[in-house]
Amino acid sequence: MFFQVTPRSRYIEVIAKGREGVVVFPTYVPGSYLIRELERNLVEIEGVRISKNKFYVKGTFRYLVYASSKDQREAISTDDYLFINPPAVFPFSEVNEKYCVKLSLPSSWKVATTLRQEGDAFCADNYHDFADSPIEASPNLKLIEVDDMHVISTIDDVDVEIVRKVVGEADKVIQPSRKYVFHFRRSDKNFGGIEHRDSSAIVVPWNREELAILFAHEYFHRLNVKELYPADLRHNYEREVYTDLLWFSEGFTDYFAVKVAVRSGAIERKKGLERVLSALHSLTFPGAKRVSLAESSRTAWIKYYRQDENFLNSSVSYYDGGLALAFYADAKAQRGIEECFKTLRERSRGGAFTFDLLDKAMRELGFEELELAYKPAREILEAIREELGLEVVDEGKEYYGLVLEGNRVKFVEDGSPADRAGLLPDDQIVAVNGTSAPLRGEAEVLLLREGRVKRTKLSPGRNPGHSLRLKLTGKVAEKVFMGEVEGEYKSNVI
């Protein structure tokens, strides 16, 4: 198919040429496990609707897409900027045919994409490659060279030296053969990043300064997800695809991002350990006793990407849990677990691997507990506590089991004093013992709930433990973080 694109403020107009028949607009973006209903942004189309995302069209047809999303998973078009994640704008008919796009832009605009340029068009040999190649354009676009193999495409400023450090360290494992583009933008929201085969798209707020781990995470995905991937994680642009292994694809990537950032000198060892402790902190909640990392991976579509105020009670993040398991494995294995990727490259079928193959690779490195991924995630925390001396510093101390945002209840821990007293998320604490004093000891609490005033008594109980401290020394410290390090994570649960 061939797409002629004319962007304007808030909209992208497309003239598509192909064969008469059915075209399909993707409902989600690979790498982001949520049905986003991308076709919702379709405003006009010359065709007959068959279903929510399928249309019968002539060989040439016009359509109009609303494009005002700041999210790097979708598309935005303004009078001086264009970013397109292809699944958010372009449909497909036959996946294994050639796809090309031509942009109607003023001559002053620059374009960055990993699509192959053919004359005045940008092309890919199939829809998978086409969909995996974002397009960024602007008269203000800067193409900043990191080195011969890596470029940052951005309209903003970025610390190139930090990117250079993490890329240099990561490439010791990745060993790339193709060029790579970081699409980077500042915004008023924090969207994070999403990986592509030869690029990534990263959107962060203006006040975010530490970017090394995020850049390292998205970049490491070119190996872990784009080259090596769970065998059951196959492309499907219309419905959910399930795997038990997102904890490896995302969580191990998260761990290696921390390790790469530390070993490259982009962040201090203490910062790296604090990120690890932050991940371990999420395993101190009831959800980690109920759910395994494998289950968390399988329910990503309805749990992780749709987190509500009860998420920590009902589930666990496969990012955090996978990071915790990777950290534990790296600490216990006889050799650095980055060597498992070499084994997967040698033994996987075209990059596709199973848990059994991954388990064998880890056992060869001296780690024999990967089955923890199929047990309640809390067991990973307990193993680290026993083997590495992790301290739970607030265990047994008085607490209520609440997280507050101002005077509003944000989270209530299952089985806590606050839970037994009947407090709910979104309750507003108006007064404590008739005053504006903070919660302390036995308290009569005046609440505002759905516009109604309610009184309840709240007594502190014993904290199951959420704040953590860890000191790494000796061979473990050297292997993981290149030296002795100590850190602490203070929980916001009161």
Image: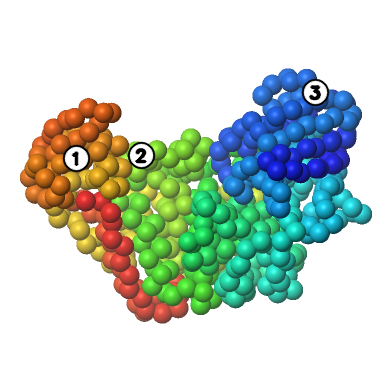
| Location of mark 1 (residue) | 430
Q: Is residue 422 left or right of residue 243?
A: left
In this view, 202 is above or below 401? below
Q: Is residue 408 left or right of residue 438?
A: right
- The image shows residue 284, relative to residue 181, as above or below, that is above
Q: Earlier in the sequence, mark 3 or mark 1?
A: 3
Could you tell me the amino acid type at mark 2? Glu
C-alpha span from label 3 to label 1: 56 Å
Secondary structure under badge 1?
Answer: strand
Residue 410: x, y in percent?
31, 43
For marks 2 and 1, give the one nearer the viewer.
1
Q: Name the quadrant of the N terminus.
A: top right
Residue 446 sits above or below residue 182 on the image:
above
Q: What x and y, as percent, mark residue 268?
A: 44, 75
Q: Quadrant of residue 445?
A: top left
SS assignment at label 3: loop
Three-letter amino acid code at the position of disc 3: Gly
Give the mark, 2 or 1, whose residue is nearer the N terminus. 2
Q: Which residue is mark 3?
A: 47
| Residue at x 51% of width, y 57% of height | 205
Instruction: Say which of 392 and 192 sits in front.
Output: 192
How far apart are the two marked residues, 2 and 1, measured between alpha carbons? 20 Å
Report the colour scheme. Answer: rainbow
Q: Which residue is mark 2?
A: 309
